[in-house]
Amino acid sequence: MDTKKEKGRNKLSELVRSNRQVTVAEQLRMIVSLSIPAILAQLSSIIMQYIDASMVGRLGADAAASIGLVSTSTWLFGGLCAATATGFSVQVAHMIGGGGITEAKSVLRQSLIATLCFSIVISSIGIGISSDLPVWLGGNESITGGATMYFRIFAMFLPALMMNFLGGSMLRCSGNMLVPGMLNVMMCVLDVVFNLLLIFPAREVTLAGIAFTMPGAGLGVEGAALGTGLAELVTMTMMLYFLCFRTGDLCLLGFSGSFKPTKQCLKKAVKIGLPMGVEHFILCAAQILTTVIVAPLGTFAIAANAFAITAESLCYMPGYGIGDAATTLIGQSLGAGRKDLTRSFANITVGMGIAVMTIMGIIMYFAAPLMMGIMTPEPQIIDLGVMALRTEAFAEPMFAASIVAYGVFVGAGDTLVPCAMNLFSMWAVRLSLAAILAPTMGLHGVWIAMCIELCFRGLIFLIRLKGNRWMNSRNIANLNSNEI
């Protein structure tokens, strides 16, 4: 039986499926209502990385650099999981928008098995290469041991990360942004608790004048990876519970159907997710190559680069949150055949993303010393990080345009051309400039190259958004029950 809360949660789908004119005020309310929980979810993910970096940074430059060395590799594996989840969740968004709730539930059941199998495969690959990866990346002996253990533990928990991505993206595409956002906040809290217990040794702590012994395992870098993995595991359990067993469009209670993935469902998932996965792989390969460019600059440069990337994430994650909202709105609007609404949602979400990230860029410019100082007490790392953040602040408006526009294209099922645009921008512009500037300008040259590339990327995404080809109806996964 529907409750008032449940009716409110389904209001988006009902409004999109109706044929009446949706006012700009109503569109803004929907975008904000979806964006805020999505931004919260994205910020919580980055805050968790910020927590890890801050805690490990207290152990010294080598410990910080050992995580920084493999950070781009963890993004690579995590991004492959996210792309796989998107291949199924976009199908669900289109089906819900078109009123195909039964078909959406069928795709959900199949996605649970398909994504789990995929995550086990890449987890095995990650564990297998963990010993050699830090050496391939050019790390010195003082940091390769910690980097190996950090990445190995991260890889062990990839199935939990995969199911978190799947659960969160499915809930968001059904219009439920609140639960994923709240659960990601919970994951941050759990990460802090687990890190306090696992990173540092047992120690005397005084709180409000009361002295007590804080238990601790003293695992250092390994404790940071293990704490994050355990937080992901607990959150995964809650995410799948809310997705599959609580009321909502995708609740599987009383729904009969096979969990075995069908050829048609997998084909659609591959069509949507493969370009994203290939793009992410090549983008992260470029980021890994950037790490190789930075590695010869020394331990301080490696740590500063990694910390600055983490700190900057706090600035651009609101853009990704709005992009997630755009994916849901565009997917359901196109699924319902509302191209007029699709265009309006696209323009408003991109404009909102640019406005929010412009403000965040200004804040980052002035708060850069504080942001870096929280993560490390090393003056050299702080100085290099502040330089990087202040350079990057000028790119945030156009970075926002590329982030949210990409979310729009994903919602439309149009991933191939945007992926190619991302790859060209990264490899032809960023890496070329970084390779030219790094030998003479050091880390500053690497971040100048990044700033120029992000501005270029935003421009080409805005040009594509202005056209209509991304709204081509053949991108939409209109599947009937027989095809599922």
Image: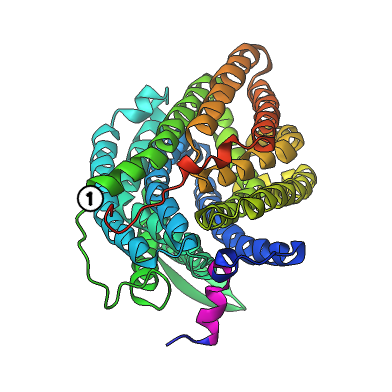
399 up-or-down from 333: above or below: above
Indicate yes or no whether the magenta region holds residue 5: yes
Magenta span: predominant SS is: helix
Query: Relative to 129, is 359 above or below?
Result: below
Figure disc tally: 1
Residue furthest to the front in view is: 19
Q: Residue 232, image x and y in percent?
A: 39, 59
Secondary element under disc 1, as helix, strand or loop, is loop
Q: Residue at x 24, y 55 (%)?
A: 113
Up-down relation of residue 14 to residue 392 (above or below): below
For mark 1, what is the residue?
Answer: 262
Residue found 68% across the figure and 40% down from its top: 401
- Front position in the image: 399 or 230: 399
* Quarter in which the C terminus is drawn: bottom left
Query: Magenta part of the protein: which range?
Result: 4-13
Nearest the viewer among 40 and 212 is 40
Q: Residues within 10 Å of mark 1 (few under 14, many from 20)?
A: some
Q: In this view, does 391 lie to the left or right of 252?
A: right
User: x, y (%) of residue 89?
Assistant: 41, 54
Q: How is the image coloured?
A: rainbow
Q: Position of residue 477 (x, y in %)?
A: 41, 48
Q: Which of the 4 image quadrants contains residue 123?
A: top left
Please name the amino acid that badge 1 sits on. Answer: Thr
Can residue 227 be seen at all in this image of the molecule?
A: no
Residue 55 pos. (x, y %): 52, 53
Determine if the magenta segment contains residue 189: no
Q: Is residue 64 visible?
A: yes
Rendered image quadrant of residue 130: top left
Image quadrant where one finds the N terminus: bottom left
Using the image as rendered, state which of residue 279 and residue 439 is in the foreground. Answer: 279
